[in-house]
């Protein structure tokens, strides 16, 4: 059994992908905000922007940072309960950090950056996680903090202007198959499934297939919230750009192939 993202890496797509980026309509936005050089890894910045956006929309810090929380608990399982005591003394236990996340002030953003460093314990092996930067060594500078704040505000503004927002982190039960058993989108609006990417690069064929798979899973779930969804889209708050594609512009043949050969219904 595979997640959506794992399944994508298990199969080979045709040249250019099942869904080509050229099929999408590109929309660019301008808020007169500039982003500057950051002192944290891009992957960590992406997680912080993602989780803080979810927190600002839901006000549920444990749900927004659930992977960080799980990662921290895996870390304690690996290193022992004495590590939790040590972390509390240094103010970097997951509980200590998430208690400081209140909004988009500097202290909240710094705490979020440190909390997200624990994701690696959930997403990678303990051996790899041991080589990752420690929460106690993560200190975002002023430019990094400002960039995160700008990108979160862009994300919230984008959803407000392209809503209404129906669900944060939509899942697709019971629409999964015998091969694909997990996967969740970023945001669901009334007519579109959105994936947010904090990257300096354009979306690739893995990203576009991921969205098509989400749409297909939603249709197979027969859940009401997916009944009016007729678009898939990618928003990048770093570039302040959105790529949007009407499902009617994807051939029925392509949808059928992805259903049968990728998702394996």
Image: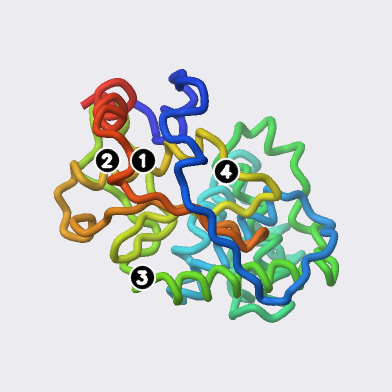
Q: Tell me the tag on residue 165.
A: 3
Work out whether residue 67 or residue 247 is closer to the camera in this orientation and state it.
247
Mark 1 nearby-residue class (10 Å; few <14, some 14–19, many ≥20):
many
Labelled pair 1, 4 in contact (Cβ < 8 Å):
no
Would you place residue 116 above or below residue 99 in this image? above
User: Where residue 30 sits: x, y (%)?
Assistant: 65, 72
- Would you identify the image quadrant in which residue 180 lies? top left
Taking the image as shown, residue 219 lies to the left or right of residue 231, namely left
User: Where residue 91 sits: x, y (%)?
Assistant: 72, 67
Quadrant for the C terminus in the image: top left
Q: Tell me the tag on residue 203.
A: 4
Mark closer to the observer (3, 4): 4
In three-dimensional space, the C-alpha distance between marks 1 and 3, rounded to whole angstroms, equals: 19 Å
The residue where tag 1 is placed is 212
- Name which residue lies at 29% across and 34% down: 251
Q: Tell me the tag on residue 3.
A: none
The residue where tag 2 is placed is 216
Q: How is the image coloured?
A: rainbow
In three-dimensional space, the C-alpha distance between marks 2 and 3, rounded to whole angstroms, equals: 20 Å
């Amino acid at each position: 059994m595979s997640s959506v993202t794992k399944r994508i890496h298990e199969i080979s797509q045709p040249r250019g992908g099942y869904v080509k980026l050229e099929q999408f309509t590109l929309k660019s936005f301008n808020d007169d905000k500039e982003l500057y050089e950051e002192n944290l890894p891009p992957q960590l910045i992406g997680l912080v922007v993602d989780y803080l956006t979810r927190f600002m929309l839901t006000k549920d810090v444990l749900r927004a940072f659930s992977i960080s929380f799980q990662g921290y608990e895996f870390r304690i399982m690996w290193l022992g309960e004495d590590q939790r005591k040590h972390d509390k003394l240094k103010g970097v236990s997951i509980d200590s950090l998430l208690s400081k996340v209140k909004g988009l002030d500097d202290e909240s953003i710094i705490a979020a950056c440190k909390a997200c460093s624990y994701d690696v314990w959930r997403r990678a092996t303990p051996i790899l996680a041991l080589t990752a930067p420690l929460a106690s060594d993560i200190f975002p500078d002023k430019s990094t903090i400002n960039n995160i704040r700008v990108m979160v505000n862009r994300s919230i503004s984008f959803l407000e202007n392209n809503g209404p927002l129906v669900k944060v982190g939509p899942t697709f039960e019971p629409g999964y198959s015998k091969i694909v058993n997990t996967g969740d989108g970023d945001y669901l609006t009334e007519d579109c499934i959105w994936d947010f990417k904090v990257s300096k690069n354009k979306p690739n064929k893995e990203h576009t297939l991921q969205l098509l798979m989400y749409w297909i899973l939603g249709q197979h779930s027969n859940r009401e919230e997916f009944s009016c969804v007729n678009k898939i889209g990618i928003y990048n708050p770093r570039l302040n750009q959105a790529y949007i594609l009407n499902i009617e512009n994807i051939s029925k043949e392509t949808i059928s192939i992805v259903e049968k050969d990728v998702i394996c219904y």
